[in-house]
Image (cartoon, helix red, strand yellow):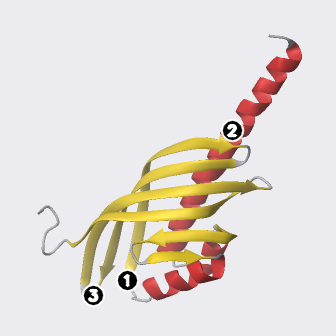
Amino acid sequence: MNDNAMIENLLARLERLETAEAAREVTWRYANAVDGPDYVLLGGVFTDDAVLVTRKGPREGRDAIIEYYRTAMADPVARKHFVVNQTVTSTGPGTALVESYFLYTYAGDDTAILGWGNYVDRVRVIDGVGYIEEKRISIDVHADVREGWATA
């Protein structure tokens, strides 16, 4: 391999690594924003044309996504998300697919919820910062821990 080819190869590898780190970082910003809730931070997580897909259907555009979260998180409960077991796949220069498991808790006067599921995020890096352009949320378990979650 000549020097130019080696440099091109190293630059491409560096770009993939930087994209992967930006993609991981945006998943942290997302969880932090939802836990707040911090709608300003949440607005900085998604692209203008982002799509969110949940069991309640799709939401298109950042404003519609933020409104969805304002409604979904209206209850005054403490929230905590844990994003785990991530895999990041490069899908092109400055883009990546992030697949994650997540766990969450909700705690309030009349609430003690434990849940988990999967996130699938398509991320675009803009000026070195990752933004979610598509997020798919699949919840496997959402259970009141006072009633038990380990049943079928």
Query: Which residue matches tag 1?
Result: 77
Q: Position of residue 18 (x, y in %)?
A: 70, 42
Q: Is residue 43 left or right of residue 104?
A: right
* Amino acid residing under circle 1: Val
Q: Is residue 114 left or right of residue 134?
A: left
- Which residue: 12% across, 74% down? 147
Q: Is residue 9 left or right of residue 34?
A: right
- Outermost residue on the front side: it is 57
Q: Position of residue 51 (x, y in %)?
A: 58, 70
Q: Position of residue 82 (x, y in %)?
A: 41, 59
Q: Which mark is residue 16?
A: 2
Q: Position of residue 11 (x, y in %)?
A: 79, 31
* Amino acid residing under circle 2: Arg
Label 3 secondary element: loop
Label 1 secondary element: loop
Q: Is residue 73 visible?
A: no
Spatial distance from mark 1 to mark 2, Cα to Cα?
38 Å
Q: Which quarter of the rendering shows the N terminus?
A: top right
- Which residue: 52% across, 79% down? 37
Q: Nearer the viewer, mark 1 or mark 2?
A: 2
